[in-house]
Image (cartoon, rainbow, N blue to C red):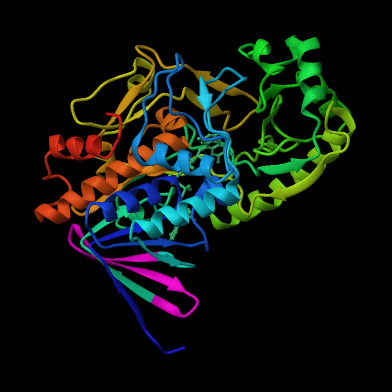
Amino acid sequence: MTESFEGKADVIIVGGGSAGVSSAVAASRSGCSVILVERYGFLGGTAAASMVGPMATFHTKSGKQIIGGIPEEIVLALIKNGGSPGFVKDTIGVCSYYVPFEPEILKLVLLTTAKKSGVKLLFHGWVYEVIQKKNKILGLKVITKGGPLILKGKIFIDASGDGDIASLCGVPFSLGDQNGLPQPMTLIFKLKQVNQKEITEYMLSHPEEFHPETLFNELANSSHIGVSGFFSLWKKGEQTGETHIPRDRLLFFSGVEPGEMMVNTTRIIHKNPINPWDLSEAEIEGREQLLSLLQFLKKRIPGFQNCVLAQAAAQVGIRESRRIHGEYTLTEKDVLKGSKFKNAIARGAYPIDIHDPSGKKIVLKQIGGDGYYEIPYPCLIPLKISNLLITGRCLSAAHEALGSCRIQATAMASGQAAGTAAALCIKEKRETREIKIQTIQRKLREAGAVI
Ligand SMILES: Cc1cc2nc3c(=O)[nH]c(=O)nc-3n(C[C@H](O)[C@H](O)[C@H](O)COP(=O)(O)OP(=O)(O)OC[C@H]3O[C@@H](n4cnc5c(N)ncnc54)[C@H](O)[C@@H]3O)c2cc1C
């Protein structure tokens, strides 16, 4: 294999997840040539490869919509293609509405949206090096089946979730909580032939066994439910040695089709997702937990006696890895106060949701004020580099704040903002710090974003 490969575009985006696709679509619709490079052979990132859902959240706890634009367009396309019932009530009571979706349909919807918008896709490409001159990126080196490939561009967007590009450029980052431990990883799986009616009947007759905010009065009439609890049965499983998972409850959500459940209950702690040996152990542990969990569900949990494993995620889900340092770092206080910023480019309304990095608990802290906070543009600008933006899970946020803003609807909204800002840099021939915030905001509003 001696052939050498190259690609060239105005904007190069790394990562085809929620944030990367929105960035690419926004930049392309604004008239730029765009290459999106993704290490898998499909789009969707964590939402598809790790089967993470439901999509949260487009609304405040009181039901006000705070995200529109490309993220909302994706939801409408999912509904149209039979991949989602749309916004449904969160029966666990953590947020007001979320969006159940089928990961396979999401892959198709994102692919169609990206292609229609003119995005050039490079699949099966893994970025491993940056070509840099002082504080500017000139290109990226991508490893492919055919050997190394060089991508040259003017503006780059790191939507890798792990902040790979910023870190390759030497931008400082943090990892984890005050002890350096990131949130646990989880291998999600889908079951079919689950009897939802039996689950809800058990819930209604044992309300003390479930998350206290559960909307019991909605359960019977909801086609799609979320369930957090089964505390005593779970404890019994621990005592009998049937489960060995460091958590205190079962967590699962209805899939799109009747009888499907997406189980979000495995928990892998004390592993660093950017250490390849830790990540490998996490994949192994996730599948081992899946096996024991499946047997436990069938034996102990009402409604699961006849369940069948339909699919396990291709990759363990990573809640948190590198937190890249940007010109502004979103703080826990910003999120909890519902802070607003003059230079806002996106909004979030999901509570701070931290799965204990070293133990069994889940900590949930609701947003104050009017129920949503804003993300300022400097959270998308990494320190040091003049032509790179960071978005989605790797935008600049503290451990606690990331517990909220990592969520898919907000990741897509910050993605749309990054793509819009990148396009403006190209049009005006400016660096990321030089463009006017009012122009980004105007362009975002014109494209349906709520800011
Ligand atoms: C277990 C779990 C449960 C969650 N629960 C929910 C939930 O209920 N609701 C919700 O809305 N959110 C939830 N989240 C959060 C949410 O799913 C993610 O934070 C969000 O999807 C991240 O989107 P992203 O685009 O920033 O990153 P990702 O979706 O991770 O996309 C990054 C993409 O970059 C690619 N990539 C990475 N590095 C490279 C490289 N070097 N070269 C090329 N490609 C690269 C990856 O393959 C991937 O496709 C959960 C997350 C986890 C892990």
> Residue extending furthest bottom?
2
Number of marks in the rendered image: 0
| Residue 181 relative to residue 117: left or right | right
| Residue 93 relative to residue 322: left or right | right
The residue positioned 44% from the left and 43% from the top of the image is 74
Which one is nearer the viewer's eye here, 198 or 176? 198
The residue positioned 62% from the left and 20% from the top of the image is 91
- In what quadrant of the picture does the C terminus appear? top left
> From the viewer's perspective, is residue 216 above or below residue 31?
above
**Horizontal and vertical percent position of residue 126:** 45, 65
> From the viewer's perspective, is residue 370 above or below residue 269?
above
Q: Which residue range is magenta in the image?
A: 128-148
Q: Is residue 94 magenta?
A: no
Which one is nearer the viewer's eye here, 376 or 51? 51
**Horizontal and vertical percent position of residue 335:** 37, 22
| Residue 314 relative to residue 19: left or right | right
> From the viewer's perspective, is residue 356 above or below residue 154?
above
Choose top left, top right, bottom left or bottom right for residue 170. bottom left
Q: Is residue 143 magenta?
A: yes
The answer to whether residue 103 shows anywhere in this view is: yes
**Horizontal and vertical percent position of residue 44:** 50, 50
| Residue 121 relative to residue 50: left or right | left
Which one is nearer the viewer's eye here, 66 or 380? 66
**Horizontal and vertical percent position of residue 1:** 47, 88
> From the viewer's perspective, is residue 23 above or below residue 251?
below
